[in-house]
Amino acid sequence: MNDFPDAESLDGRLLFAIPKKGRLHEKCLSMLAGADIQFRRHARLDVCLVLNHPIALVFLPASDIPSFVGKGNVDLGITGHDVILEAEMQEHVSEALRLGFGKCALQVQVPEAGPIKTVEDLAGKRVVTSFEVLAGQYFGAIDERLDLQGEKRTKIEYVGGSVEAACSLGLADGIVDLVESGDTMRAAGLHAIATVLDTEAVLIKSRATKHPEHLALIDRITARIAGVIAANKYVACQYNIPREKLAAATIVTPGRKAPTIAPLEEENWVAVNVMVEKKHIADKMDELVRIGAEDILIFNIDNCRV
C-alpha cells in the first residue's frame, strides 16, 4: 500500500475500509458524500483522514476487506456479500446493511452451442472460476448427490481474470463467475444454466467488539448510510382523501412502516404523507386516483433517517 501512515497517526480513529477500485468504488464514494463523510484523498494514497469525524478511510481490494474487518483492526467496511462467503469470514463479520447497489449473480455458465445443458451434465468435468470456495462447495454437493468419487469429481481451477474466455480457449467445460448485465457472457458465447447465489454490496462490521469507544460512531454512520439508501429508494407521496376511503388507500400506500395521517379543515377529509418506492410510484398514483385521492404530490427525498 502506497505511503501508508503509521499507527500513531490513526490512533483513536475509526477505520472504515472502502473498495479501492472496481464495480463498487464509485457508488461507495457517492454514498459517503450522502452520509456527509467529508474527506480529501490525495493521489496514490490508500488512506485518508475524514475531516468532520474521527474516521480514517482505508482503500483496499474488496476481496480483502472481510479479513481486515473480521480479523484486523478495521471497524467498518463495504464489500460484496459474495466476497464474505468466498473468504469464509461469515463467522467473523456481520452484515449491518444491504446497500442496494452492486447487484449481480454468481452463475454457472457454459457454451450456448455445446452439449452441456444442466449442472448435472457439467459435474465431473472442468470448471474455471475466481470463486474457488463457493464453486467448490456448490459442485461438491452435486458430486455427492451424483456419487462421483475420486477422479470422477468436478475439477475446479482458479483464474484471476478473463474467466469468460476459459471455455473458448480450451481450459474449461464451464465457468462460475459474477454476471451483472450478461453482455460479456453472451459475447463469449456463454449462457447461464444455474445461479449459485445473488449478491450485492453490504456494509459489514466485526462480530467482536474491538474498540468500545467507537460503538456510538459506528451506529451513527450506519444510520446515516441507511438514510442515504432509503432516500435513493423512496419518494415522499402526499395526497388528500375522504376518510371513508382511507383504509383502501393505506393498503395501496402502507408506507415504509406506517403513513402519517392528519385531519383537514374540510369535514371527513384527511391528508396522508407516506414513503413509496420510486419504481412503483406511477402505478401507486394511478391506484390512488381510482380510489378517490386528490392533490397527489410527489417529492424527491435528498436525505432521511429511517
Image (cartoon, rainbow, N blue to C red):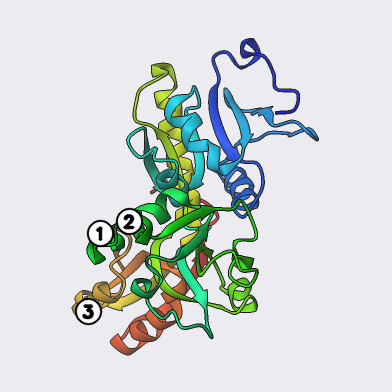
Front residue of this view, candidates 246 and 128: 128
The residue that mark 1 highlights is: 144
Front residue of this view, candidates 30 and 80: 80
Distance from disc 3 to disc 1, alpha carbons, whole Å, reads: 52 Å
Residue extending furthest front? 151
* Figure quadrant of residue 50: top right
Amino acid type, residue under disc 3 in the picture:
Ala
* Figure quadrant of residue 4: top right
Residue 153 picture location, percent across and down: 36, 59
Is tag 3's residue or tag 2's residue first in the polypeptide sequence?
2
Name the quarter where the N terminus is drawn. top right
Side (left or right) of 272 relative to 10: left
Label 3 secondary element: helix
Residue 52 picture location, percent across and down: 62, 28
Labels 3, 2: front one: 2
Label 2 secondary element: helix
The residue that mark 3 highlights is: 248
Amino acid type, residue under disc 2 in the picture:
Gly
Residue extending furthest right? 43
Residue extending furthest bottom? 290
